[in-house]
């Protein structure tokens, strides 16, 4: 069972599982932080168990690390050793999610810019 392997890797904490999953897919902490859109210091704090990510970040992190959110939280479920390779469907889903996030951010930026222009014109 995977949970038995988990203990042998010393990944019995959320931070340990984050680190293990990241290393399994060959990402540096800086690369992982960039993909998630957080500061490297935040990622490092999570891996060192000095802080925990919010639920929405944890869900996005699980997608980036190709593991289930449940596995990150508990060590149960689909972990990195069970994922043989990232499927094209999963990558397409990740691309759609990232595109939607970018679109929402662009709308927010346009709204803020418009509000600034209206204040300058007043």
Image: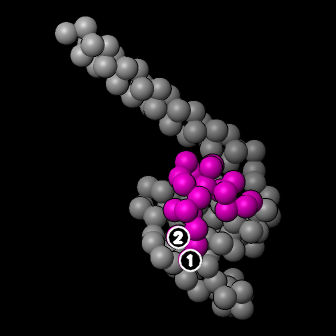
Q: Where is residue 48 in the image (x, y as percent from the top left)?
A: 56, 77
Residue 107 figure quarter: top left
Q: In which quarter of the image is the C terminus?
A: top left
Q: Quadrant of residue 14?
A: bottom right
Q: Where is residue 53 in the image (x, y as percent from the top left)?
A: 46, 64
Identify the residue under disc 2. 45
Residue 111 horizontal side relative to residue 57, left or right? left
Specify whether residue 44 is painted magenta. Answer: yes
Seen from this angle, which residue lies furthest left? 122
The x, y position of residue 51, in whole percent, is 45, 72
* Helix, strand or loop at mark 1: loop
Work out whether 112 lies above or below 64.
above
Q: Which residue is drawn at 71% across and 86% down?
A: 9
- Badge number at residue 117: none
Task: Give above or below for 64 relative to 69.
Answer: above
Q: Is 6 included in the stretch rendered in magenta?
A: no
Q: How far apart are marks 2 and 1 (CA)?
A: 5 Å
Between 2 and 108, the one lying in front of the other is: 108
Q: How many marks?
A: 2
Measuring from the top left, give residue 35's x and y in whole percent: 63, 49
Q: Residue at x 75, y 44 (%)?
A: 88
Instruction: Say which residue label 1 marks.
Output: 48
* Span colored in magenta: 27-48
Residue 90 in view in this figure: yes
Query: Mark 1 Cα within 10 Å, few/some/many (few <14, many 20+)?
Result: some
Query: Of helix, strand and loop, which one carries label 2?
Result: helix
Say whether residue 50 is left or right of residue 22. left
Most common secondary structure along the magenta stretch: helix
**8 or 47: nearer the viewer:** 47
């Amino acid at each position: 069972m995977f949970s038995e392997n988990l203990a042998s890797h010393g990944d019995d904490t959320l931070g340990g599982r984050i680190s293990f999953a990241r290393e399994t897919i060959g990402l540096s902490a800086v690369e992982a932080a960039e993909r998630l859109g957080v500061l490297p210091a935040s990622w490092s704090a999570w891996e060192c168990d000095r802080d925990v990510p919010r639920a929405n970040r944890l869900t996005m992190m699980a997608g980036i690390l190709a593991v289930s959110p449940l596995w990150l939280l508990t060590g149960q479920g689909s972990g990195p050793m069970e994922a043989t390779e990232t499927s094209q469907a999963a990558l397409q889903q990740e691309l759609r999610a990232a595109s939607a996030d970018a679109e929402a951010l662009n709308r927010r930026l346009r709204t803020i810019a418009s509000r600034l222009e209206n204040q300058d014109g007043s």
